Image (cartoon, rainbow, N blue to C red):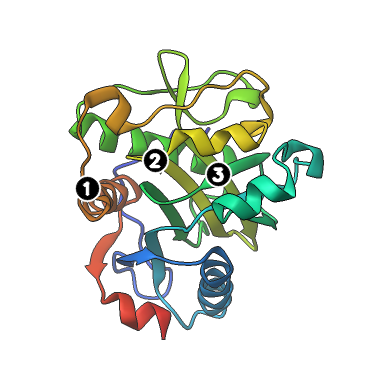
Amino acid sequence: MNAQSHKSAAHSPATGEIRPLHWAFLGSVPYARANELQDRLSAAVKRGEAAEHLLLLEHPHVFTLGRNASSEDVTASPQWLRGRGVEVFHTDRGGHVTYHGPGQLVGYPILNLSPDRRDIRRYVGDVLEVLIATLAEFGVVAEKGEGPDHIGLWVEGEKIASIGVHLSRWVTTHGFALNVATDLDLFGGIVACGLQDARMTSIERLTGQKPALAEVAAVYAGRFADHFGRRLVAIEAESVAS
């Protein structure tokens, strides 16, 4: 990975100013709608017509399959899915299959990694470092998994956060999922992250506490801006969704 300091500020090539990062906690957003928002914002960032964004939210029940997943990774029957209201989506992000749902903080950074951060391994590592710092604020000590099959964050052998990203012309979409107070039983309908024996955990399970997603989102946003050297700008959720 690039050895450049994570704390160095990212400057706009045109103006030399520190780049603003617009962020909002959007609450519950259907998965298809979140994809539309990412597509619109990433296209605008590529054209130089929009600021970078950090979208933080939760989804209704959904299984998402990354580029490395197959339909067989969803082991639940159609009846099981219907009974629990779980949708299934194929996506262009990296990784295998995972679950998103209420009580889970999902983050979608829309960043332009040009000109100084064009290193996908570094980017994934940076997103995970921000999650580690965020979890520490809530009394959880997590570490990165070892090897390509264990990408994400783990606590004593159980997975608490997953990551799967997509880059186009060095503009990022998709991102991470952090189990805050998630119904972990829903992971039983998939081969989570392509690992037959993966066990999932959450902040609530580890600490007995159930912090509000908006609170966790605010901590993450601040840590993210510091780590990537952006100037954080809070915006109204309605301005993103419009």
Sequence-wise first label, 1 or 3: 3
4 w.r.t. 16: above or below: above
Quadrant of the image containing the C terminus: bottom left
Find residue 17 and report its horizontal and vertical position in percent: 29, 69
- Residue under label 2, please give it: 182
Which three-letter amino acid code belongs to the residue tagged 1? Val
Taking the spot 32% from the left edge, 81% from the top edge, the residue there is: 238
Find residue 93 and report its horizontal and vertical position in percent: 65, 51
Sequence-wise first label, 2 or 3: 3
Which three-letter amino acid code belongs to the residue tagged 3? Tyr
Query: How many dots with numbers?
Result: 3
Taking the spot 62% from the left edge, 20% from the top edge, the residue there is: 147
Which three-letter amino acid code belongs to the residue tagged 2? Thr
Give the alpha-carbon distance from disc 1 to disc 3, as whole Å.
Answer: 23 Å
- Residue under label 3, please give it: 99
Q: Furthest residue to the bottom?
A: 242
- Residue under label 1, please give it: 219
Say which mark, if any, is on residue 64. Answer: none
231 w.r.t. 105: above or below: below
Could you tell me which secondary element the residue under label 3 belongs to?
strand
Q: Are marks 2 and 3 in contact (CB under 8 Å)?
A: yes
